[in-house]
Image: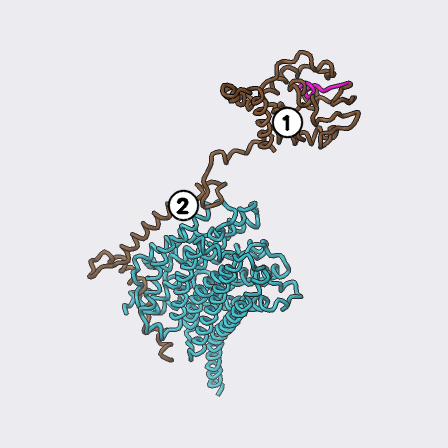
Chain colours: A cyan, B brown
Amino acid sequence: MSQPSIASPNDSLNAIDSSINKAAFYFILSAITWLLLSSLFAVIGGIKTVLPSFLSTYEGFTFGRIQAMLNSTLIMGWCSNAIFAVAFWIMARLSSTPIKHGGILLLAGFIWNVALTLGLLGIFIGDLTAYSWMEFPSYTSGIFLLAYTLIAVWGIVAYRHKQNDYSYVSQWYILGGLLWFPWIFVIGQFFINWVPVRGALQSIVHAWYINNIFYLWLCPIALGACYYFIPKLSNTPIRSYHMSALAFWTFALFASWSGMTYLIGAPVPVWLTTTSIVFAIALIIPLLILYVNLVGTALASASQLKNNLALRFITFGSIAFILHLIVKMLLTFSSIDAVAHFTMIYDAHHWQLIYGFFSMIFFGAFYYLVPTLLNHYFKSYFLPNLQFILSALGIIILLAALYIGGWQQGTQYNTVELSFLEITNNLSLWMQLKLVGLVLILLANLLFAFNVTGLLLSKLLDALPNFSNEELNQNT
Amino acid sequence: MTQENKDLNDSNELHDDAIQEIHENLIKNKELPKEGFSFLPIALIFLFAGVCFWGGIHIVTKGGEFRWDGYHPDFVAKDEALAIPEKSLFEIGEKVFLAQCAQCHQNDGLGVAGVYPPLVESDWVLGHQEVLARILINGMNGKVIVLGKTYNGNMPAFGPSGLNLKPKQIAGVLTYIRQEWGNAGSEITEETMKNYMAMYNARTSPWTSEELYVDLSPEPETPSLESDSETSDENNILDTHGDDHHSDSKHSSLNVSHKEQT
């Protein structure tokens, strides 16, 4: 292994790690909290689709509000907090620069979570907006924006002051994501909540917002993490690395244009959807490169894959992402869209991105990051391995239920003889299977929380007896 | 520490600086001649070109020509599609009639006995266009005999001395009453109406039924009648019953124009 030329690499690494330590743990713990809450909402929603009378007497627990709270906790809670924890650490590591002003980061993170809490309470009492994935009430969006500005600036500053001449592909993705998010967020909030545009234009802005929150906020950061962890953990350079720049730019350009595929058949000028279809199909270019770069590199080192839990999570996530993009392309075919539109297939597609791809990548990242920051390692990998199995099984069952059930739903919608009630009744098997998947995911997330907090606690407990022993020695 | 922990810790993973160095070198050295042949870059170039080619064609053929009103992938722009469809005189007239005339002459055009004369089958309505135009522009006072019954009411003016309707609106309402309720009169064009208004706008007093038939100019012919008469002239050469045929064709052409407008 080639040693870096810096005099004492471990010291500087420790300096970088400790610069972000407190903030990172704050974000890690709040991300885990939101993750648990979101999977709880998901299970409640899942139970309600099987047993509609469940909790139906409470206004705040109606299905629409549960779904809104689920979406908000996922995007603004789990995903964003996880991004703040992992992306900043990767950025600092690759820039060989400590993150400055960790205190402000901590404060801003606190403000962010206050905004989300306020938003969830707002949704609970009925202040939600009518736009999926941006249901949190408009009065919280300003607080989110303030907190985000205070957070993101330190990631960008770290890149600006990087100590080496290199700029690695992970840094581009993370920098891109950090810069794209505020633009997407402000435009979405401005044209839908603050100064609402009129008529069909609202659904255009909304489709643009959802698409870009997914593909220009969650995806670039998760891809940046993949590009960092896969070569690191598999001890292999990225295959065909010189093409990663092409993948970065084509992905940013094509994915951001492909949002109007949500509106195929909607009463909007058809050039919008046609252009989006073309760009969605053009995603084949970054898809192939990402496949070779990420999945190709990860699968090449089979022994590492077998031994290394974090790498296994990240490989699973990368494959889920490749499949997600393939499904996205398939959904643009008009014959497929005629069946899939208005069905659970779009639910499945979002779950695949958020849990199959993003969450799996970040589980892996956390399993690497937390022991490294603590300098304290798992004694047994039984429980983390169990979590991988539960998570993988849960998401596979969930996706199978939603994709197959959604296809059945769509074909039956197109059958004139069947009434809506019959079609809904025919879905009950898939709804039960979906609930099984969601319960498995809840269990996996509980196990994940247990593993990470357990490691944290055992580190604290390890430190404690040493201290008391010394004290005892001194006393005697 | 288990084997796994060691992997995570140090021995078997790339250092951060190594990640950057190795990959930087990969970029710098990619030009170096290599043994074998890398298939992917060439294939990607072809694929990229193919996607651009297909995408361009797809956007042009299925893009609704980038028009705001193209809502279907198979949209084909027509030039007249942009223009707001023009209402026929009959439709304009119907609207004006229901707003202005129907209070007295009633929706069914039958009027009110003794006061407001009927418009259905009335000679006044179906007769000379100038008579109708005079009544509308300046109004009418005094007794009038319609279909054998006497009426005595006041018809207000709708020209500049009265409600000041536009020539097109008056032409419309006249066309409407001449072609609704089974009436089969000719259309009164906007052009004709403009001519009449130029003649009578200056007059301020309403007409009486005696004055109305004095000094009439020849009745203008509507375009459809002209074209009809041309064809009937041709037919005259072949047809010995020219006159009958003429009246037949006139009648049928009116029916056709009525159907089109309703």
Q: Which mark is residue B209?
A: none
Nearer the N terminus, badge 1 or badge 2? 2
In this view, the residue farthest toward the bottom is: A476
Q: Residue A254, position in %: x, y?
A: 40, 52
Q: Which amino acid is tagged 2?
A: Ile
Task: Determine the chain carrying the residue at label 2.
Answer: B
Q: Which residue is drawn at 78% across and 21% down?
A: B150
Q: Residues within 10 Å of mark 1 (few under 14, many from 20)?
A: many
Q: Residue A365, position in %: x, y?
A: 42, 68
In this view, the residue farthest toward the top is: B215
The foreground one among A274 and A118 is A274
Q: Give the residue pinned by disc 1.
A: B184
Task: Determine the chain carrying the residue at label 1.
Answer: B
| Highlighted magenta segment, given as a residue range | B133-142
Q: In this view, does A141 lie to the left or right of B105?
A: left
Magenta region includes residue B139: yes
* Disc 1/disc 2 C-alpha distance (Å): 52 Å
